Amino acid sequence: MSANVPPVDRVAAAQRSIAARQARAAVKARISAGELPPVRALRDAPGSSYERMRVTEFLTSIPGVGPRRAEDILDEVGVSPRKRLGGLGVRQAESLARYLARGITRAERAQNRLFVLAGPTAVGKGTVAAYIHNQEPDIMISISATTRLPRIGEVDGANYYFVDDATFDSMIADGEFLEWATVHNAFRYGTPRKPVEEALAAGRRVLLEIDLQGARMVKSKMPNAYRVFLMPPSWDELVRRLIGRGTESEEEQARRLETAKVELASVSEFDAIVLNDDVGRAAREVVGLMSC
Ligand code: 5GP
């Protein structure tokens, strides 16, 4: 069929498609920059130069909305992620507009300041978090409680609160944890709730450096938390880093590598992936994501 289309028409069609792509990119850039309210962009979409923009593309151009959040919003308003703005039914467009116009409530805004940094063992989450702590003192890095023993050089109250099993049990019983988990089938780790809630209420951004189970629990309790997955450059590099730091016994290393396989398989659950090829670069990328 297309062989019968006169070349002039094909050139014109290609030009129209380039112009439409540019129009979509320009609208997304204006939404990202806060110049164009998303509700207005949605209202004006039918018949516009950007009507073929996919709803997911539209939502992820809104500051603070990552792919996971976009998926949740679309799920809530009952719109398929494959829909284009111009193809929304009247009722779909209305419920999406209502969601956006309602804006984000105070609680949601606080949750939007909560960030999770997860990723497999030895990928360097702790090092990246420490770098962020030094460079961005206004970001609160949560200090977890753990039942594992301190490693050489670790300081109680700075790296972790090192507690015994009985203390950890009573912290659970008293509802003191935002989340907690048994990690690598060995020790328990938990995020103390109060300091996190106080920092969020004071308008600070908070970063939790936790494992996959904790990341899932935070997501279920605070769906607007933004979750970043720190990725090693390769599996071999991960093994090299784990063995190289020499802080675990061979048995513990094997256990951690088993967990790492499970953690790596969960990457699609996250809002963003950051490659830890260089600590400073990765930390800056995480801070960039926290500043959107
Ligand atoms: P490590 O023993 O190497 O310091 O930490 C082991 C694992 O526990 C890491 O994956 C770390 O992210 C995770 N972890 C540290 N603190 C917490 C926490 O408060 N909650 C959960 N769920 N995991 C944590």
Image (cartoon, grey):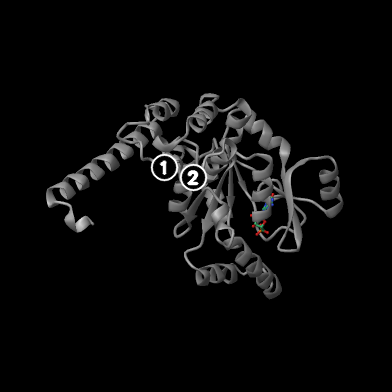
Q: Identify the mark nearer the N-term, 1 or 2.
A: 1
Asked if ligand 1 lies within 8 A of label 1, the reply is no
- Ligand 1 quadrant? bottom right
Please give left or right for residue 112 compared with residue 18 in the image: right
Q: Which residue is mark 2?
A: 81
* Callout 2 secondary element: loop
Q: Residue at x 66, y 50 (%)?
A: 216
User: Looking at the picture, does residue 80 appear above or below residue 38?
Assistant: below
Q: Residue at x 16, y 48 (%)?
A: 11
Q: Nearer the viewer, residue 286 or 249?
A: 286
Q: Are marks 1 and 2 in contact (CB under 8 Å)?
A: yes
What amino acid is at disc 1?
Answer: Arg
Q: Nearer the viewer, residue 209 or 127?
A: 209
Residue 156: percent from left, percent from top: 71, 49
Residue sitting at the far bottom: 250
Q: Is residue 143 visible?
A: no
Circle 1 packing at 10 Å, graded few (<14), some (14-19), many (20+), is some
Q: Residue at x 69, y 41 (%)?
A: 221
Q: Which mark is residue 269?
A: none
Q: Which residue is mark 1?
A: 54
